[in-house]
Image: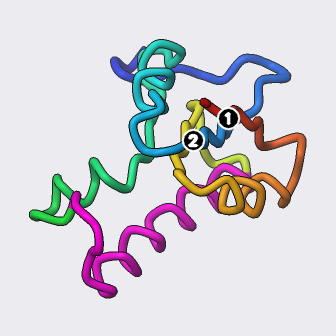
């Protein structure tokens, strides 16, 4: 068994799209619900990790890069290439609807008020 990895349970949605206004507690909710080996995709945290890009507005080339990473993560989930659950954090409810509309069996939606 490799450390830091877990297999999804049968019937478990591989992607949880978590939406809510800034400061609503999306990241906190994800951290409370994730299991060891799960992944949180948080554009703010990733922007801060690769440079000083956590604040808005971000340069368009950085936004494109971060959205490309999210798209690749979602494609891998849709193709069954992930052995772990992924939490995708978005502030805009319309973005969450767009992401989750692809396949209801693959995406679970959570909105934090």
Q: Extreme left residue here?
A: 52
Up-down relation of residue 30 to residue 67 (above or below): above
Up-down relation of residue 5 to residue 20 (above or below): above
| Quadrant where the image shows the C terminus | top right
Label 1: few (<14), some (14–19) or many (≥20) C-alpha neighbours in 10 Å: some
Distance (Cα) linking label 1 and label 2? 6 Å
Up-down relation of residue 7 to residue 27 (above or below): above
2 vs 10, nearest the viewer: 10
Position of residue 7 measured from the top left corner of the image (x, y, whole percent): 60, 22
Give the numbered dot on residue 111.
Answer: 1
Q: In this view, does 30 lie to the left or right of 8?
A: left
Magenta-span inclusion, residue 93? no
Classify residue 58 by image quadrant.
bottom left
Give the numbered dot on residue 98.
Answer: none
Up-down relation of residue 106 to residue 90 (above or below): above
Q: In this view, does 102 lie to the left or right of 33?
A: right
Helix, strand or loop for the magenta stretch, by majority: helix
Position of residue 14 measured from the top left corner of the image (x, y, whole percent): 69, 36
Classify residue 51 by image quadrant.
bottom left
Query: Label 2: which residue?
Result: 20
Position of residue 37 measured from the top left corner of the image (x, y, whole percent): 43, 24
| Quadrant where the image shows the N terminus | top left
Q: Extreme bottom residue here?
A: 61
Q: Extreme right residue here?
A: 104
The boundaries of the magenta stretch are 54-79
Mark closer to the chain start, 1 or 2: 2
Q: Are marks 1 and 2 in contact (CB under 8 Å)?
A: yes
């Amino acid at each position: 068994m490799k450390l830091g990895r877990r297999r999804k349970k049968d019937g478990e949605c591989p992607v949880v799209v978590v939406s809510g206004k800034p400061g609503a507690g999306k990241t906190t909710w994800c951290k409370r619900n994730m299991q060891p080996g799960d992944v949180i995709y948080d554009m703010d945290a990733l922007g801060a990790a690769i440079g000083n890009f956590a604040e808005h507005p971000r340069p368009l080339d950085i936004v494109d890069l971060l959205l490309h990473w999210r798209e690749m993560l979602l494609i891998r989930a849709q193709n069954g290439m992930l052995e772990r659950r992924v939490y995708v954090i978005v502030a805009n409810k319309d973005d969450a609807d767009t992401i989750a509309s692809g396949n209801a069996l693959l995406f679970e939606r959570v909105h934090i008020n």
